Amino acid sequence: MMISLMRTKISLIAQKHFYTSVVAPQIADEVSKLLDLKAQLGEENAVQHKLILKTPKGTRDYNPEHMSLRLGVLEKIIAVFKRHGAETIDTPVFELKDVLTGKYGEDSKLIYDLKDQGGEILALRYDLTVPFARYLAMGKISSIKRYHIAKVYRRDNPATTKGRYREFYQCDFDIAGQYDPMLPDAECIRVVSEALESLDLGKFIIKLNHRSLLDAVFATCGVPQDKFRTICSSVDKLDKTPWEEVKKEMVEEKGLNEETADKIWNYVSKSGGVDLIADLRQDENLMKQKSAVFGLDSMELLLKYCTIYKVINKIVFDLSLARGLDYYTGVIYEAILIGDDVGVGSVAGGGRYDNLVGMFDSKKKTVPCVGVSLGVERIFSVLEAKMANDGVKIRTTEIQVFVASAQKNLHEERMRLLSDLWDAGIKAEQAYKKNAKLLAQLQHCEEYGIPLAIILGEGELARGEVTLREVTTRKEFPIPRDQLIDEIRKRLQN
């Protein structure tokens, strides 16, 4: 027994010696090699992951010229909204994800998810309509006419030259409340027309259709009811995709038989006006659908009101217009520029969504709504291209008067005069150099389109005068100091 214990002890000592003298150095050597390799990889990754200064895909920066153009566009659009009695609201840039899901059909895959933040599953807003419906339901609001201008986010394939971004502004105008048929709907179409006319974008048409009529077409053609929405999403692509590709999607991806798809094409290839309503009423199979009767009656009334509102010459009743979002329930419309060089396609769209608010109400109380959204990013793309082609320079400031000095050490006199101009509400500035050269000051006025310049000199100050210069004509006039404010206002008005 004693001998056995001795052998075990000797064996353990030998193993320890072997580990200490042979194994441990090998492990230490391998660890050292791994650490060296890790350091090398770290250096390589540092090079590979060097910060690249760029905006995220589908976004852009806006320089002063762009922002000046944007603000001018938004001012014109807001003026139209206010002319029609709208008030404005704002909502958070992100919503609970459950608020947004199930409202956009196949486009739901484009929603930007946010990670769990403090116990809430959130998503960036996809549009301004669903947040508006949530706002109405939360506030128990049964009627409002509102506009909302804010950024929305879509995980889409961007085409920035055509005004398609992942982050972009929407301008929404909506009328919520229980009103007589087609009165608010017709006004929304008038709002679209006024806004596009005010922006001087060129010729445009507003396509109209009715969701009830589309559903009747699908039923007549034999589309199963559970496929109405997904087939509607396919039809919605006809404005930018050939029929053969849309048909292929219907048949191969969505399981529709070819005969049914061809029947759909026989309907959605039609467009017109009141004459098309008359033709469709002769279709016995279509008129068996109650939704067809309702849709055609609604369209007839809408076209009548559009005639009264003097926009009928800008309207086309187009059965291919589908607008794939799930929440539309009635009339739908889309404005398209004709002959623009940028090829942006639709610049406005909207429709009636009577059931959306009820989705958020515990008692399923509905608030009928109709609205329109203007795609301002696409409008900006058209205007930017137009101004670039015409060589138009955009003013980036609103300065009306530049205060200049002709001799040295007159900067304090410039400052006193500036203070008086600002007190009078006149937009004015000066050079931030005590002794700026007069030529450089006047060149600044011409470069930035400043209409008037005031020139101070020792002689003028001694006489109690200033020299007022018209920048474009370069004509100069001596003006008494005490008459200067009135003279500036008179010339700015002229």
Image: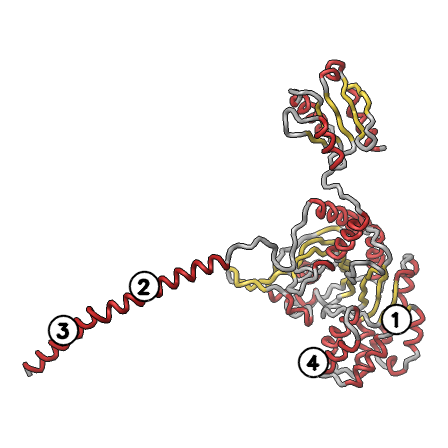
- Give the foreground label among 3 and 1: 3
Disc sitting over residue 13 in the figure: 3
First along the sequence among labels 4 and 2? 2
Label 2 to label 1: alpha-carbon separation: 76 Å
Label 3 to label 2: alpha-carbon separation: 27 Å
Q: Residue at 66% of width from left, 20% of height from top?
A: 408
Residue located beneath label 4 in the image: 253
Farthest residue to the left: give it.
2
Quarter of the image containing the N terminus?
bottom left
- Give the foreground label among 4 and 2: 2
Quarter of the image containing the C terminus?
top right
First along the sequence among labels 3 and 2? 3
Neighbours of disc 4 within 10 Å: few (<14), some (14-19), many (20+) = few
* Secondary structure type for disc 2: helix
**Residue closer to the observer: 342 or 164:** 342
Kind of residue sitting beneath label 3: Ile
Residue located beneath label 1 in the image: 271
Q: Residue at 79% of width from left, 21% of height from top?
A: 483
* Secondary structure type for disc 1: strand
Kind of residue sitting beneath label 4: Glu
